[in-house]
Image (tube, rainbow, N blue to C red):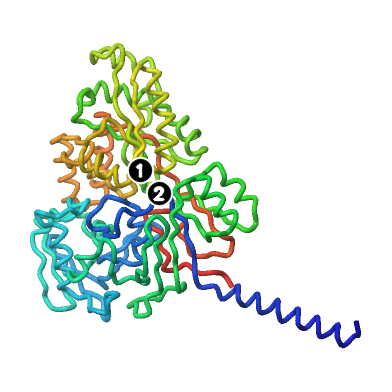
């Protein structure tokens, strides 16, 4: 090879490498793995957090929104004023907001969304968020006034939930299959059993997305999730279902491992109206039969923080009540005998798909058997769980992680799926809702934690860790999960 041909070959190789590098730097799409597929795509009419995992902030937005640190920030409302008595909120909406079908988002849409959520026939899974609203008035296209029956210190927080996003009346008929929101991404397609595809909303009112396209790929099996990530078939996996594999990703320079906190109280839910669980002694017996650390180690490979009540340990108002339900099989057996079940009893244990439930359920069933409680394991898909357990209340025990933020208020709802009916707790939560003083609110929240712990409403297991895996050059993913969301609005590839 002559010097000239050598230089030409080197130049060609350099140009090819530069071209390849430029192509890599120009990547504007992402494929995200998720374990759970949504049952449908309307966040305002289902309890499935899997819907928010795909659509929260990306496609749908509310008057306010949660940020990655859990704080509440303006959303579709640019600002607001609160009356002196704390009962009237006047929201000023942002200018130039359109839905993905090109129609204008205005005060009429806000009124429609809030009225629909609080209507008598509403199927909103968090209808309690809207019960305090007595009137929604359109002042002008950019201004809406919301009147409450009494002050509610959590109202702006409540409006940030996925259940409170703003939707258009024209989109409701097909919203479960074709969601139309105002977010930085618009819905493109849903291939059920496989993927949901979003694309950048070119007409977004706010800071535009840095990605042009996002594909959510549904991989329920933990082994398959690990294989897909290692093969780089996907770019990130939010809520990675195989924690035992995280050390391998940590040791591989191709990847980054994101470990944070969630709002997910993982509990052994107990049907408080179904005998024998209507006896607090039986519920306490269940609590003392459970070895939390064995569940965290066996199902989550050490990832998770033990809890003794329905409250996130990272919250400043958290009270550590784990000692009230410490692992004590002898005490459990004594309580069962006192309640009239010296030989134990039989019940059902419904397990939805997440790894924490399926793996944790096997461990819990074995622990319960040690004190004489035979729990028949029934594996169900999410749609079945929503129908049988959540709506039908046809279960004895189940395992689920409640990922909604600061949701201890669900214990004030007697018709909620675990059917806890305590007027004293309901009164306490009503007082909390009308209290604005921070110190008084903290004291009330701590009283609430103690009350449900003392009633052994559920078996409190652990706070779910936020476990994510992503390619090393991916930036902007949430580390913590203040709500169940995979917010891609600020995600990009590093240059």
Q: Residue 33, position in %: x, y?
A: 47, 56
Mark 2 or mark 1: whose residue is earlier in sequence: 2
Query: Image quadrant of residue 415?
Result: top left
| Residue lying at 45% horizontally and 45% vertically, measured from the top left | 465
Q: Residue at x 21, y 43 (%)?
A: 391
Badge number at residue 401 = 1
Q: Is residue 31 left or right of residue 184?
A: right
What is the CA distance from the residue labelled 2 to the residue labelled 1?
10 Å
In the picture, which quadrant includes the N terminus? bottom right
Q: Quadrant of residue 209?
A: bottom left
Q: Please, what secondary structure does the residue beneath circle 1 have?
A: strand
Name the residue nearer the viewer: 416 or 303. Answer: 416
In the picture, measured across the screen, residue 80 lies left or right of residue 149, that is right
Mark 1, residues whose alpha carbon is within 10 Å: few (<14), some, or many (≥20)?
A: many
Which x, y percent locates residue 290?
39, 26
Q: Quadrant of the C terminus?
A: bottom right
Q: Answer with the quarter of the image where residue 322 lies.
A: top left
In the depicted structure, whether residue 478 falls above or below residue 306? below
Q: Position of residue 296 (x, y in %)?
A: 46, 35
Q: Which residue is mark 2?
A: 262
- In this orientation, which residue lies closer to the viewer: 440 or 182? 182
Label 2 residue SS: strand
Classify 326 as above or below 391: above
């Amino acid at each position: 090879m002559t010097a000239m041909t050598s230089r030409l070959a080197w130049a060609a190789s350099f140009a090819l490498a530069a071209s390849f590098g430029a192509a890599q730097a120009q990547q504007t799409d992402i494929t995200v793995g998720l374990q759970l597929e949504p049952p449908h795509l309307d966040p305002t009419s289902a309890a499935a957090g899997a819907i928010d995992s795909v659509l929260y902030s990306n496609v749908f937005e509310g008057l306010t929104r949660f940020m990655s640190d859990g704080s509440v920030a303006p959303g579709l409302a640019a600002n607001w004023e609160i009356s002196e008595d704390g009962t009237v909120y006047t929201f000023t909406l942002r200018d130039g907001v359109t839905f993905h079908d090109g129609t204008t988002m205005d005060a009429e849409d806000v009124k429609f969304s809030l009225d629909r959520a609080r209507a008598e026939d509403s199927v909103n899974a968090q209808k309690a968020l809207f019960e305090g609203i007595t009137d929604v008035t359109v002042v002008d296209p950019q201004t809406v006034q919301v009147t409450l029956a009494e002050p509610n210190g959590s109202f702006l927080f409540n409006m940030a939930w996925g259940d409170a996003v703003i939707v258009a009346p024209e989109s409701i008929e097909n919203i479960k299959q074709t969601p139309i929101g105002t977010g930085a991404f618009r819905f493109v397609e849903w291939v059920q059993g496989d993927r949901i595809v979003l694309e950048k909303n070119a007409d977004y009112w706010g800071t535009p997305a840095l990605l042009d396209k996002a594909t959510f790929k549904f991989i329920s099996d933990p082994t398959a999730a690990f294989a897909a990530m290692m093969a780089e078939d996907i770019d990130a996996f939010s809520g990675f279902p195989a924690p035992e594999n995280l050390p391998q990703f940590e040791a591989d320079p191709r990847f980054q491992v994101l470990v944070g906190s969630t709002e997910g109280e993982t509990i052994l839910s107990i049907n408080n109206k179904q005998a024998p669980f209507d006896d607090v002694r039986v519920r306490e017996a269940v609590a003392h039969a459970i070895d939390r650390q064995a569940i965290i180690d066996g199902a989550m490979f050490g990832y998770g923080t033990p809890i003794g009540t329905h409250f996130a340990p990272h919250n400043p108002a958290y009270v550590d009540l784990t000692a009230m339900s410490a692992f004590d099989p002898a005490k459990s057996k004594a309580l069962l005998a006192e309640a009239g079940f010296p030989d134990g009893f039989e019940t059902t244990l419904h397990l939805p798909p997440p790894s924490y439930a399926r793996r944790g359920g096997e461990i819990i069933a074995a622990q319960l058997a040690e004190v004489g409680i035979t729990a028949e394991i029934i594996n169900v898909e999410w749609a079945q769980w929503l129908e049988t357990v959540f709506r039908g209340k046809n279960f004895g025990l189940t395992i689920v992680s409640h990922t909604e933020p600061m949701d201890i208020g669900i214990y004030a709802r007697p018709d909620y799926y675990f059917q806890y009916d305590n007027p004293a707790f309901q009164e306490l939560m009503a007082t909390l809702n009308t209290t604005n003083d921070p110190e008084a609110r903290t004291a009330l929240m701590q009283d609430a934690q103690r009350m449900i712990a003392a009633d052994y409403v559920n078996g409190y297991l652990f706070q779910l860790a936020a476990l994510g895996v992503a390619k090393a050059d991916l930036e902007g993913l949430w580390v913590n999960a203040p709500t169940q969301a995979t917010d891609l609005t600020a995600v990009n590839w590093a240059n």
